[in-house]
Amino acid sequence: MGEDPGRQHAEVAALQHGIELGLSLIDTAEMYAEGGAEKVVGKAIAGRRDQVFLVSKVYPHNASLKGIPAACERSLQRLGTEHIDLYLLHWRGQYPLAETVEAFERLRAEGKIGRWGVSNFDVDDLRELYQVSRDCAVNQVLYNPSQRGIEYDLLPWSHKRQLPTMAYCPLAQAGRLLKHPTLAEIAERHGATPAQVSLAWVIRQDDVIAIPKAVDLEHVRLNAAAANLVLSSEDLRAIDRAFAPPTRKQHLSMV
């Protein structure tokens, strides 16, 4: 969002519709449209900040002791708020994790952020992070039925440590995944859509959160309704047959 000024009205309306439907978590980042997405979010949450759990992310090249507070301040201004509920390192960069964590903790002490976390971290990254601090609130990674690599080791490692996983691209950017016949068959059984089936599959575990993007108001409504879709064991087996779970370590997928 935020890349096309002509779409801003629709984007704000979609976010506000989601809030009205109870989709209280909004995820953004300084990278998205180089701050443009945060400005859209700021317009959407004006007057309803208390209804929203706000997540934003800092560029790795800003993740230093001096860079993080400056980046956070810019994000706060674009978002029109004094507090980000959850602030993430977008991916690993040149700065030591200890320096990034110290900067996060200073922001937390100042009340600028509520918690901090990471994005695009694999198991080895998290192990290294846990040598510095275990206060990480979440790891945001790519996850959907067609991209299940994290199930081999990352999800079990995180689950054991009660570290929630936030799944981005839970619809695989709405491409071929949603045209797959297996998802279509399951959707027909439930009177749902393939996108709703994919979302329900992603959030079938209590410690996994999905953050689908939607600008169309009907898509927002359908996304919200997906929270009430419960897949059967037969459905889950069918998805496993169509999209086999990983049997070996895979490189962490990123977009």
Image (cartoon, rainbow, N blue to C red):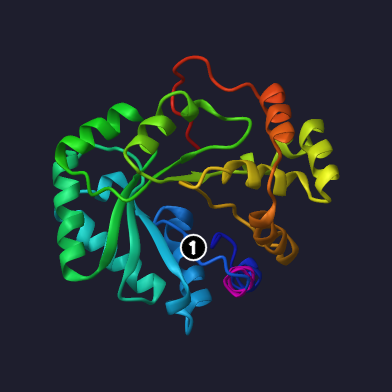
The reply to whether residue 121 is visible in this rendering is no
Q: Is residue 122 above or below residue 198?
A: above
Q: Nearer the viewer, residue 90 or 9?
A: 90
Q: Is residue 19 magenta?
A: yes
Q: Amino acid at mark 1?
A: Ile
**Picture residue at 42% right of the left edge, 65% below the top:** 54
Asked which quadrant contains residue 84, the reply is bottom left
Element carrying mark 1 = strand
Query: Residue 210, percent across and down?
Result: 54, 49
Q: Is residue 82 above or below residue 98?
A: below
**Picture residue at 25% right of the left edge, 50% below the top:** 62
**Picture residue at 64% right of the left edge, 68% below the top:** 14
Query: Residue 3, percent across and down?
Result: 55, 59
Q: Which residues are magenta?
A: 14-20
**Picture residue at 44% right of the left edge, 78% below the top:** 49
Return the residue at label 1. 26
Q: Is residue 37 magenta?
A: no
Judged left or right of residue 178, residue 119 is left
| Mark 1 nearby-residue class (10 Å; few <14, some 14–19, many ≥20) | some
Q: Nearer the viewer, residue 35 or 53?
A: 53
Q: In the image as oriented, which residue stretches furthest toward the top?
A: 248
Asked which quadrant contains residue 127, the reply is top left
Q: Nearer the viewer, residue 252 or 134?
A: 134
